[in-house]
Image (cartoon, helix red, strand yellow):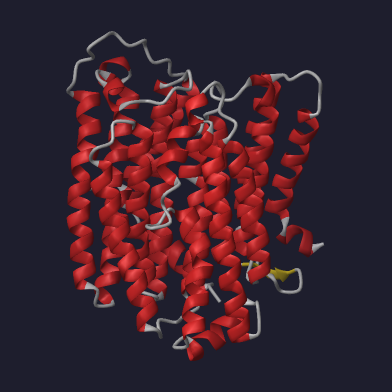
Amino acid sequence: MKEWILFAPELCYTLMALVFFWLAIQKKVDQGRAYTFALVLSGLGVAVAVLCAGQQGMLFFEAYRIDLYSQLFKILLALGTFFVIFSCSELKGIDARHHPEFYLFISVCTLGMMMLVSAVELLTIYVSIELSSYSLYLLVSMRRGEDRFAETGIKYFMVGVTASAFMVFGISYLFGVTHTTYIANISKILPGVIHEPAAIIGLVLALSGFFFKQALFPFHVWAPDVYQGAANQVTTYVGTASKMAAAALVIRLVGFSGGESQVFVNLLYALSVLSMTFGNLVAIIQKDLKRLLAYSSIAHAGYMMIGILAMTERGYATAIYYAIAYLVMGFACFLVMMKIADDGHNLEIKELAGLHKRSPLLAMTLMMGLFGLAGIPPTVGFTGKFLVFAAALEKGYLILTIIAMINATISLYYYLIVIKAAYLLEPVRPYPPVRVDTWTRAMCIVLVVGMVYVGIFPDQFVALTEAAARSLP
């Protein structure tokens, strides 16, 4: 009986997927009923994930590990999924008859990502990442009535399967070097053989699949087009929830090397610098808000890598904290975007003009989210960057920290352009009023208070992330 309890969050999303599979094969689609089911079941998923946070154990011939680390990320995934479904009350970007399929793919993708953060065996990891990835490929392709973005799903699929092929090739090298596919065994053997070229190549190629999901340079090429081409709710899911699973696996897998190979460390160092610099510089010239947030996410993948590069418990803990911060800040920005572009169109920055008059609460939510992404105190983003930089300095990465601080300063420019549009620019033509219901108001207040509270009083959350990092094998 205990084994079923260990797998309870995954079973909850399996049930959710079955419910929407049943709805999808019905002749008549009731959008309101589908949304109600999705909201209730995703809320149940959050409750189950929280209740199972203290569970520990191993499943499926020790290929599946339940610990505080994996359970924390499952809570984040459940929250991210709930946030996205909460914002789907007006799902204008997806054809009405395909709403059940939309929720089905969301459920299956979340299930795959939950399996991903608990998997501690390479083939199980591969199956989990493919389960989540193919759901995302289908979600991205579901946008209604936008022929100019029709190729987005195909491009995402082609780049994704290429990354998966590299990952499988890398897994084969790791197996050849260590003669095992279990992470616990690999983490013991690999530091002793990490100086062999096959071990370094295998680890880098295996990580490339997760760098792809994280949109780390140079595995980022899909992100701007997918963000822009997908429906707004799908972009929100890709930009928030899916990043949690990628962060969890990168943290777990980078620990394989134990920091023994200077070549591998230098490679991660270079990827971090390139990702931060490229993302921030290209974001400056963007006019479409979703493309701007896409390049911003590339930069933030580089910031997160700084904490991972420390390869210490504190470094991993700061990376987890940063992932939590990014989930909240990212969703705040996407929520405002979805409410302003409630007909499903892509929002340009100039359309934010006069937002502080049309909806002061949405303008404040957007401002706090962008301040957090820029690392301005007292937001959670500032605390996240401070902790990550502190962990890097403890490890001696002074130059890397200086580069990161310069990049954070550069990012201020394009975040302030968005805030300037919302607060200082007058619209050149009258835009329709922004309708904000009671539940959205409540969500905005929760997000704003959360970003400030966690930024000012991070102690409990830092202690939680440190405990999660200690539970890593």
Report the side of 127 relative to 376 (left or right).
Answer: right
Please say if 163 is above or below 242. Answer: below
Whether residue 468 can be seen here: no
Nearest the viewer among 132 and 166 is: 166
Report the side of 190 relative to 20 (left or right).
Answer: left
Please say if 351 is above or below 166. Answer: above
Report the side of 77 relative to 396 (left or right).
Answer: right
Residue 383, percent across and down? 29, 55
Nearest the viewer among 166 and 378 is: 166
Q: Residue at x 39, y 49 (%)?
A: 326
Residue 396, percent across and down? 24, 77
Q: Residue at x 28, y 62 (%)?
A: 273
Residue 165, percent across and down? 59, 62
Report the side of 125 relative to 238 (left or right).
Answer: right
Q: Residue at x 38, y 58 (%)?
A: 218
> Which picture quadrant has residue 364?
top left
Whether residue 65 can be seen here: yes
Please say if 83 is above or below 28. Answer: below
